[in-house]
Structures are given as C-alpha cells and as structure tokens.
Amino acid sequence: MMDINQQWLDETSNYMREIGGDDCVMTQIVDVSSTGEAERSIQRTIEDLGGLHILVNNAGIAPKNMLMGG
C-alpha cells in the first residue's frame, strides 16, 4: 500500500494485518501524483518482493464539492 498520509496508511494497514496477518501488506509513503516517486516506489517493491506480477492503481481524489451533488 502507498499513501502520502502516514496516519491513514498506518490505520488501514493495521486493520489489514488484523485480518490477514503481519505479512499480508507492505507500506510506503509515496506521493503518487509525482511520476518519479511512483516509479521509485514500484522499483523498491520489485526489489523487496523479487518481482511484480500485478499492480492495482486505486488512487484518486474527489473534490469536496463533487460529493453528494455539491
């Protein structure tokens, strides 16, 4: 998992570890809006895991006024 916000990353990854165990998630602080940071993070993941077969990009932001019709 990658997130720019350490607190959100910790909360979510801790929840996932409660369900799936300590080895079920890896975390990195990354600003995915930065191409360079994203590429370095992917490279680090490949090195840590010995490869990467599937990557899910689920990043996104919705402006506050876009939610619930304005």
Image: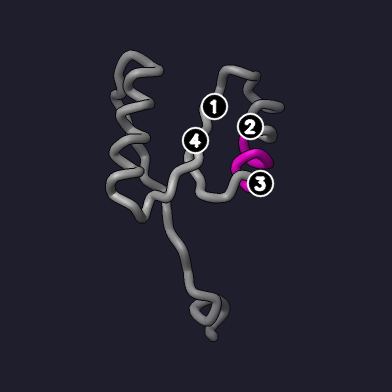
- SS of the residue under disc 4: strand
Q: What residue would you read off at disc 2?
A: 16
Q: Amino acid at mark 1?
A: Val
Marks 4,2: beta carbons within 8 A:
no
Q: Is residue 56 left or right of residue 17?
A: left
Marks 1,4: beta carbons within 8 A:
no
Q: What residue would you read off at disc 4?
A: 28
Q: Amino acid at mark 2?
A: Met
Q: Which residues are magenta?
A: 7-13
The label nearer to you, 3 versus 1, is: 3
Q: Earlier in the sequence, mark 4 or mark 2?
A: 2
Give me the residue at 49% from left, 35% from top.
28
Q: Amino acid at mark 3?
A: Gln
Marks 1,2: beta carbons within 8 A:
yes
Quarter holding the C terminus is bottom right
Query: Rounded to the nearest whole Å, what is the CA distance between mark 3 and mark 1?
Result: 16 Å
Residue 69: x and y in percent read 53, 83
Residue 67: x and y in percent read 54, 76
Q: Amino acid at mark 4?
A: Gln
Query: Rounded to the nearest whole Å, what is the CA distance between mark 2 and mark 3?
Result: 14 Å
- Most frequent secondary structure within the magenta stretch: helix
Marks 2,3: beta carbons within 8 A:
no
Give me the residue at 36% from left, 55% from top.
33
Residue 47: x and y in percent read 34, 18
